Amino acid sequence: MTATAARSGLIACSLCGLLNARPHRHAGMKLRCARCGSVLYLRKPHSVERCWALLIAAYVLYLPANLLPVLETAKLGERQWDTIMSGVLQLLHDGAWPLALVILIASICVPFAKLSSLTFLLVSVRSGSPADRVLRARLHRLLNFIGRWSLVDIYVGGLLVGLVRFEPVAVISPGPGAIAFGAVVVLTMLASQSFDPRLLWDAGGQDIRG
Amino acid sequence: MRAGRTSVAEDQQRGRDIPEALPEATAGERRWHWVLLIWVVPVAAVLIGAWLAARGILNQGPTVVVSFKTGTGLEAGKTRVKYKDVDIGTVRSIGLSQDRSTVLVEAELTPQAKGLIGDDTRFWVVRPRITGGHAFGLGTILSGAYIALDPGKSPPSSRRIFQGLETPPVVPADAPGRQFVLHADSLGSLDIGSPVYFRRVRVGQTVSAELDSDGNGVTFRIFVDAPYDRYVSGATRFWNASGVDFSADSTGFHLETESLASVVIGGVAFQTPPEAAPAAPAPPNTRFELFDNREAAFKQPATVKDTYILHFRQSLRGLNVGSPVDFRGVVIGEVARISLDYDRARPDLRPVVEINIYPERITSRLRRRGAANETSIRAQTLQRFINRGLRAQLRTGNLVTGQLYISLDFFPNTQPVRVVSRSEEPLEIPTVPGGLEEIQNSLTALLQKLDKIPLDEMAGDLRDSARNLQLALSEISRLVSRFDDQIAPELVSTLQQARGAIEQAQGALSQDAPLQGDLHGTLREVTRAAESIRSLADYLERHPESLLRGKREERAP
């Protein structure tokens, strides 16, 4: 049994970093930092539930994000709707395979990887297995790192919509899939944000949550 | 590194308890946490997802398969399906049918097109096309061919396999107007899309033209646009207004055209005869006869006809079947048959003409009498007419073309003829020679009269007269020569004497002639005498007493 701050009756402020001492009777009470007054908690409250909820929402929207058209291109009266996958295939067909690869990875593989790795983390926390905790922590760090790049597609799409607007000749407008895709990205970011990585280390027998 | 930090914490744990110096967190009332609120997010996501899915399924338009003979200009994923030039779908795939005879085009339509697809929906490919003076689908030169559809009139159905039209339908199914069926002997210069004219206004077009199954004619379907379709009633006549109709008959030369456009591309015209009673518009698909020309169309309908025969004794060259039979200029019938009749009694061959008289054209009480058609009654009527002198006569209608026609008229000075009424044979109307025959007869008579003139005697007389004339002329010449010999010299001497007299007169009258000088002196004397008389008169006026006392001495003042 290793000594932790929690076990020693200490609680750190996540905002200013001050180490506070927990009062003796604090069950059901809301603790605030003695210095900055922000709410103190040993673990993010309801982190797992929150994470699950957002994750499920992301899963649900992941389907329309990939099935519905993301961009609608109209050139010379000819309209074309492209889903992410058809866009990739189109690029591949046109011979721009590096670009196709980038979009394939950034828009299809990465979101899916994020979703599945978050699921994996949550499941592992629930089961309380202590195995590979360091590896899982590394996965979590990777998740947070990648998260900020996930919106590249939406960004590019938004740029195109804004740039290509020669009314009768060519118009690009976002399709319903773009909104779903953006929602997926935001939801996964929120989910990974609401996941408290300290839970990983709690899996070891003692329940020190609350 | 992590391991290191852990060891520090362990040291601390081992070393001592909670440091006193650490500030204690302030404890406050914990408020209710809306933890469950976070589950709204996935529920909302599910709802949105479900909605999107439902919309996707509902928005799935019908997929139709249309077969065409060729796939010219069609491209999978690119060719559009349009209705009224509005995109309602895209061609998904193009393939061949099982037997490879047709091209199967699978098109995915938008959901809004669901209501357009019925059992009689027609599909065709719009390509650039130029027919009948019109150009169609020129826009497709740039944009490429597209598939157009015409929804038809039947309600939307689940039929999804269609046979495409190879040529665009001439009239869209929803066009207001009515279709009529025309029957003609031949196609003429008409074609699908040929215009239909009403008083030279283009009011419709030919939709189809096909040979009858028995091969005895051509059946047209024409479409007359609303509101002009109401001008088509049961009594309306249709005729072929194609091209130029040039005809020469006993009434002269005719040149008829509808309009320049119809001269080039042909057309159908219709009109209701003015004498027809106003009737309700004809129901759709009414059958009409398509006449060859306007004249034929406007001929009175010959539903009732009486046949008569005429025997002529002259050449019938110039008389044709169809030549008019008129009565004082009104056409009341036409020649039905021309043949030769063998007269056994004479024996002789006579030309016989069968004519049809249309009693309907004779607006009389005759028509109303039901029994008028019976031969015996007709014979009686005819007998009355013949007694008044009714005869048939061949007349020349047109001197240039030599066309003949038959004229019925009253000739009061003719011999009475009895009408022979035999029920199985048409009644005969007696004839009188006429036309060229008449001229011929007159000429003969004239020649005969000429023949009677005693030309030989006349020539003898003429010769005697000429001789007498010669004698008279020689007499005259003798007279003239005598005049030359005797009278002329005397005349010359007389003239010379006359000239001498005139010269003498001239000498007497000239300025320096003595007569002239004497005359001058005398006149001067007379003037002087006159002056003396005037001075005497003056003196006497002043001194009238001098007449008595004599001239007084002038006293010097």
Image (cartoon, helix red, strand yellow):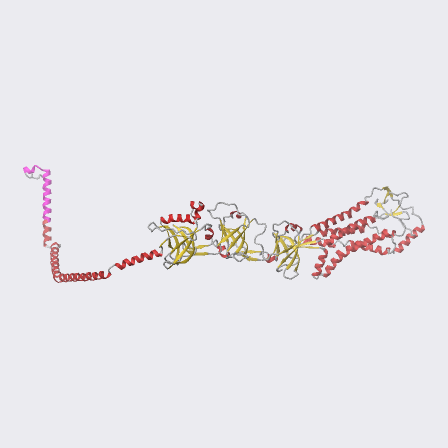
Q: Is residue B530 magenta?
A: yes
**Observer-nearest residue: A17 or B285?**
B285
Q: Main secondary structure of the magenta part?
A: helix
**Observer-nearest residue: B48 or A19?**
B48
The residue lying furthest to the left in this view is B549
Residue B456 shown left or right of residue A99 in the figure:
left
Residue B530 in picture, x, y percent from top left = 10, 45
The answer to whether one can see residue B116 in this image is: yes
Q: Is residue B170 magenta?
A: no
Residue B214 shown left or right of residue B529 in the figure:
right
- Up the image or down, B367 lies above or below B76; here it is above
Q: Quarter of the image containing the C terminus of chain B?
A: top left
The residue lying furthest to the right in this view is B15
Image mark count:
0
Q: Quarter of the image containing the N terminus of chain B?
A: bottom right
User: Residue visible at 11% across and 49% down?
Assistant: B523
User: Residue visible at 71% across and 60% down?
Assistant: A92
Residue B540 shown left or right of residue B224 in the figure:
left
Residue B496 in picture, x, y percent from top left = 12, 59
The answer to whether one can see residue B557 in this image is: no
- Up the image or down, B199 lies above or below A96; here it is above
Task: Give residue A170's quadrant in the image.
Answer: bottom right
Residue B28 in picture, x, y percent from top left = 86, 41
Q: Which residues are magenta?
A: B523-549
**Observer-nearest residue: B131 or A55?**
B131
**Observer-nearest residue: A182 or B83?**
B83
Residue A184 in picture, x, y percent from top left = 76, 51
